[in-house]
Structure formats: structure tokens, C-alpha cells
Image (cartoon, rainbow, N blue to C red):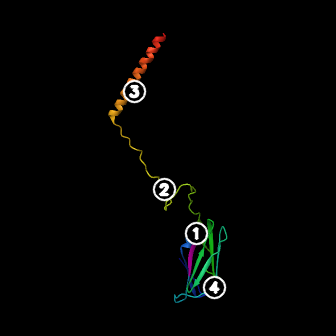
Amino acid sequence: EMCIRDRLMSVRVFVKGDGLKGGQAGQNLHFEILLRDSNGKPAKISNQGVSIFIEGPVETVPTWDIHVGKIVVEYKPLKAGLYKIHITLNNKKVLAKPLEVNISDPPPQLTDSSEEKTEKNEPIAEPKTEPPKITVDPTDEKKKQKKTSKYNQKRVKRRTEEKSRFT
């Protein structure tokens, strides 16, 4: 918040707002210019008496709305960098030098759009499925082994007999 007093206009000027602290490129930023007379009451100014110019890395055109005792200013810097805000009221510079505002790049966005996301931009978890449980009766397993070993024994015996016939 700043206070500028202009004796010729007999108006005190206060400039305040988050839009003077900085922000991100592509974001709408706001600040207010408060006008008070010598008694501290809101002062009037005509639209023709207001000039706000913003210089920076790219052209940024501010818009403003004038109320009794207050000018609400909005601007949208499109590129990161240093911006200088010049304010003129009734053809008089409000500040000896412009207000400087640093604008940063917005945070990087996730570019992988192939994954579905939740409202909080988190990947949707696949439902957990457990492999089917197989229960094996140990007595059945032993019977199978016995049958297999008996079969193998018979097979080996047959082969041995066949070999001995040919030799």
C-alpha cells in the first residue's frame, strides 16, 4: 500500500492490491487506486482525468472502473517478466517512478492426457484384483504322483524290454 499526496489536486492517493505484488502470466490481476480529499473522504475524479499505462515484455492493456473515491484496475500480463505500471491522474504523474511488478511463468501442466484423472488431477487407480485362490487337496496330489510314477515305471520297463530284444 502506498500513499501519495498531491497538493495541487488536494487529493491523497493510495495504491493497493495483490496485482501490485506480482502474479503469473495469463492470470487476471487487480489493484485499486483510492482517492481521498483533505478531510479523508472519498474524492471524485472524472474518467478523462485517469490514465494507466503498463509497459512490459508484451503489450498489456489495463481496464478500469471508476467509483467515487476508488478506481478498480484489472490487467492480464501474457508473458513472464518485469512490468511497469504508470498512473496519471488529471495529467499529473501519481508516482515519480512507475510501480514495478514481477510476473512469473505459470506452473507446468501435465501433458500426458492418455491417463484418466480424478477431480484432483491424480491418476485413477486400477481396481485391485487378487489372483483367484486355488485350493488343492493334498491327497489328490499324491494319488496323481503315484499314478504318474507307476505309468513311468511301466514305460521304462517296456523300453528296456524293447531294447533287449533288438540287441
Give the image location of residue 74, x and y in percent: 59, 75
- The prevailing secondary structure element of the residues shown in magenta is strand
Q: CA distance from mark 1 to mark 2?
A: 29 Å
Q: Secondary structure at mark 4?
A: helix
Residue under label 4, please give it: 47
Q: Earlier in the sequence, mark 2 or mark 3?
A: 2
Disc 3 to disc 4: CB gap under 8 Å: no
Residue depth check, mark 4 versus mark 2: number of the one nearer the observer: 2
| Crowd rating for badge 4 (residues with CA inside 10 Å; few <14, some 14–19, many 20+) | some
Disc 2 to disc 3: CB gap under 8 Å: no
Q: Secondary structure at mark 2?
A: loop
When asked about the image quadrant of residue 96, the answer is bottom right
Q: Which labelled disc corresponds to residue 124?
A: 2
Give the image location of residue 167, x and y in percent: 48, 9
Q: CA distance from mark 2 to mark 3?
A: 49 Å
In this view, the residue in front, 38 or 23, is 23
| Crowd rating for badge 1 (residues with CA inside 10 Å; few <14, some 14–19, many 20+) | some
